[in-house]
Image (cartoon, rainbow, N blue to C red):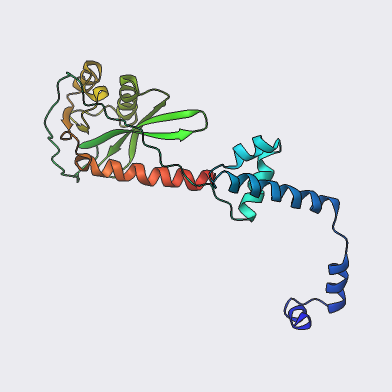
């Protein structure tokens, strides 16, 4: 069997046995020990911690831990935590669902969708407001922060206006969250004669393309981060 494997790998049997009897280097021993520690930390914590937390617990370099985890197929489980981003329990005025699930556009800057999502980081919740053009599904504006304030969506809207050359009369659809119902956000829409549209209460499908976009974005972010 050894002879056949050596032939396939194009090495001599004498070379294989010489390699097999070669003493393990100190570097290799240290890596094996660290690998054992990383696995122990990973599995005793229910396969949840990523490279950052394990490196901190073992007081070693993060890149080294990350390399070991990749080599051994150790991938952190994502904790499915939920954070509400829509607060519709307010007395602010709401508007009808003008969009009415017409998720197609004949030209750019005809219909924009907006929403807020979140990402759980080691430092806490990160909130992201985004604005999507239904014509080409281009992200025309975005804004990030550690709080879900009206400024988050206002800054997103202002960026979208600037990036698209300050268009007029865009149909801007969102949910009924207090941020979108605020007077300041509504005034920002009125400046350029935007038509406001809001989803029906508790109906996320009225903003389905935005929900789909968030899902894809989070998956790409997780794949890029690895852990």
Which residue: 25% across, 16% down?
Answer: 184
Q: Quadrant of the N terminus?
A: bottom right
Residue 157, given in percent of the width and then of the height, sits at 30, 26
* Depth check, front residue: 191 or 86: 86
Quadrant of residue 85 within the rendered picture: top left
Q: Is residue 20 left or right of residue 146?
A: right
Q: Is residue 135 visible?
A: no
Residue located 83% across and 73% down the image: 16
Q: Is residue 197 above or below residue 80?
A: above
Q: Work out whether 30 lies above or below 112.
A: below
Residue 195 place in picture, x, y as percent = 15, 28
Is 48 or 136 nearer to us in this picture? 48
Residue 94 locus on image (x, y percent): 15, 25
Q: Quadrant of the C terminus?
A: top right
| Residue 8 image point, x, y percent | 72, 80
- Decide if residue 227 is on the left or right side of residue 154: right
Question: In this picture, is 68 found above or below 119?
Answer: below
Q: Nearer the viewer, residue 60 or 221?
A: 60
Please tell me which residue is depicted at 34% across the width and 38% down the height of the picture: 139
């Amino acid at each position: 069997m050894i002879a056949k494997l050596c032939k396939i790998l194009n090495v001599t049997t004498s070379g294989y046995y010489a390699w097999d009897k070669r003493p393990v280097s100190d570097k290799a021993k240290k890596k094996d020990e660290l690998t054992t520690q990383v696995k122990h930390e990973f599995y005793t914590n229910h396969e949840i911690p990523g490279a950052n937390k394990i490196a901190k617990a073992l007081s070693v370099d993060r890149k080294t831990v990350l390399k070991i985890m990749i080599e051994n197929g150790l991938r952190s489980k994502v904790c499915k935590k939920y954070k509400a981003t829509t607060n519709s329990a307010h007395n602010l005025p709401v508007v009808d669902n003008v969009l009415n699930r017409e998720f197609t556009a004949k030209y750019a800057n005809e219909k924009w969708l907006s929403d807020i999502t979140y990402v759980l980081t080691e430092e806490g919740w990160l909130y992201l407001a985004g604005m999507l053009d239904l014509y080409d599904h281009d992200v025309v504006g975005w804004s990030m922060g550690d709080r879900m304030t009206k400024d988050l969506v206002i800054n997103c809207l202002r960026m979208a206006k600037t990036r698209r050359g300050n268009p007029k009369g865009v149909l801007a659809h969102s949910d009924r969250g207090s941020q979108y119902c605020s007077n300041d956000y509504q005034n920002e829409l009125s400046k350029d004669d935007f038509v406001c549209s809001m989803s029906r209460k508790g109906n996320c499908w009225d903003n389905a393309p935005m929900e789909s976009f968030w899902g894809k974005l989070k998956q790409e972010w997780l794949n890029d981060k690895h852990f």
